[in-house]
Image: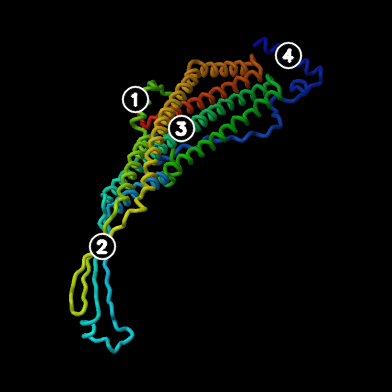
Amino acid sequence: MRVQRVRFAVLLLLGCSLGVKVPRCSGQTPQQQPAVPPAPKIQPPAAQSHGAVRLSLDEAIQLALQNNHNLKAAQTTIQQNQAQEITANLRPNPSLTLDAQFLPIFQPENFTLNYIDTTAQFDVGISYLFERGKKRQHRLQAAQDTTAQTRSTVADNERTLTFNVASQFLSVQLAESTLDLAIEDMKSFQKSVDISQERYKSGAISEGDYLKIKLQLLQFQSDVSQAQLAKVQALVGLRQLLGYHTVGADFDVSADFDYLPVTVKLEDLQAKALQNRADLRAAQQGVIAAKSQYELAKANGKVDVTGTFNYDHVSETNTGSIFGSFQIPIFNRNQGEIARTNYAINQARELELAANDQVMSDVLNAYEAVRDNDQVVTLYRSGYLDAAKQSRDISEYSYKRGAASLLDFLDAERSYRATELAYRQSLAAYLTAVEQLREAVGVRTLP
């Protein structure tokens, strides 16, 4: 304390000798304030109302799977394919033909009952197309295989939506954590500003230093404002995925934004993914569907027979006639479609192999991303966070007691804020990588 008084006395004498305006020399009382407009105070976000909805991650995913409009639109493709199964299983309709011949239209005077009975001719016929080659059975099988593949495709859409919801949920958590940090830093720095104001009043620091530290408060207030906006935007994005009218505007998330270690083997994850990935299952069913189309094409190459029975009334005579007709397959035996569908089988097999490679690559990439981000988060948690906080606290303590410069204090404050913010972003990246791994494996619970 004695050293501080001596230091202040020397500065006072030096200022007076140089003509610098110092409160003790100019007669200005220490109670006078510098002409600096008061900084606006940013209020923290208001507490939620008692009835506000707070969603966990699992609840958010369930709401999205039930109400997301894009997913519901995709689900209608299953119903459309089921309707096509009905069409594929229908039999051909019979045909009815009626005709009347030798009617005296241009000689109406001959239009008598006797003429109609003895001269006019009337025919009634019914015909039916007899499909050969089990065409109806093959059509139904092809439609059912297409429906099965569509179900898997929709399931893959659900997998993608689940990841998008989880990723957006983490964005909300990151924004909320960043907002809490910004508010905490602003409140802490406000105390430093208040203390600096008292020190300025007592003459312990210069007006320039006080103005510097007071103007620095603007950055903290801007951080709070930006964090508030980021949280609102993240909630809006999550609400869109859940279905805009599914939740109210005051909804929020409720879950711990914290580090959870993941210890799994790559081989186990890849084996699990090969069993559960819906897109791989859809590719495998695509091969089955392609084979069904090939069998249907061969069946369509079979010649159908049309059978007809006619009732004839001619000259007071009632007779019946039976006809049969079919195409002679000299030119068109559906050979083009048979060849195309055969090539389509090869295409489907290649797509299955490509999907298999995609699954293995996705799991590997996600696994490495988890490992890399886990190392970064572990480094922060191993001591860097505590070191940054201790450095800030020591600098703040020393500055408030005049043992450290303003620049040292502000530099320690910036380092602490940057470290805390970087840790939260790294934690969000790690948790997102874990969700990416879940998506790559195709399950919510990792083995």
| Disc 3 crowd, CA 10 A, few/some/many (<14, 14-19, 20+) | many
User: Can you name the residue that lies furthest to the top here?
Assistant: 2
Residue at 73%, 14% in the rendered image: 9
Q: Which residue is mark 2?
A: 94
The amino acid type, in three-letter code, at marker 1 is: Pro
The amino acid type, in three-letter code, at marker 2 is: Pro
From what the image shows, is residue 111 above or below residue 271? below
- Front tag of 2 and 4: 2
Q: Kindly indicate the quadrant of the structure image that contains residue 279.
A: top left
Find the distance from the CA under tag 1 to the CA under tag 3.
22 Å
Q: Which of the two discs, 4 and 3, labels the residue nearer the N terminus?
A: 4
Residue 9 shows which numbered tag?
4
Q: Which of the two discs, 2 and 1, labels the residue nearer the N terminus?
A: 2
Find the distance from the CA under tag 4 to the CA under tag 1.
71 Å
From what the image shows, is residue 41 above or below residue 303? above
The amino acid type, in three-letter code, at marker 4 is: Ala
Find the distance from the CA under tag 4 to the CA under tag 3.
56 Å
- Front tag of 3 and 2: 2
Q: Which residue is mark 3?
A: 170
Residues at circles 1 and 3 in contact by the CB criterion of under 8 Å: no
The amino acid type, in three-letter code, at marker 3 is: Leu
Residue 355 shows which numbered tag?
none
Between 281 and 259, the one nearer to me in the picture = 281
Find the distance from the CA under tag 2 to the CA under tag 4.
116 Å
Find the distance from the CA under tag 2 to the CA under tag 1.
59 Å
- Front tag of 4 and 3: 3
Location of residue 308 in the rendering, given as x and y in whole percent from the top left corner: 24, 64
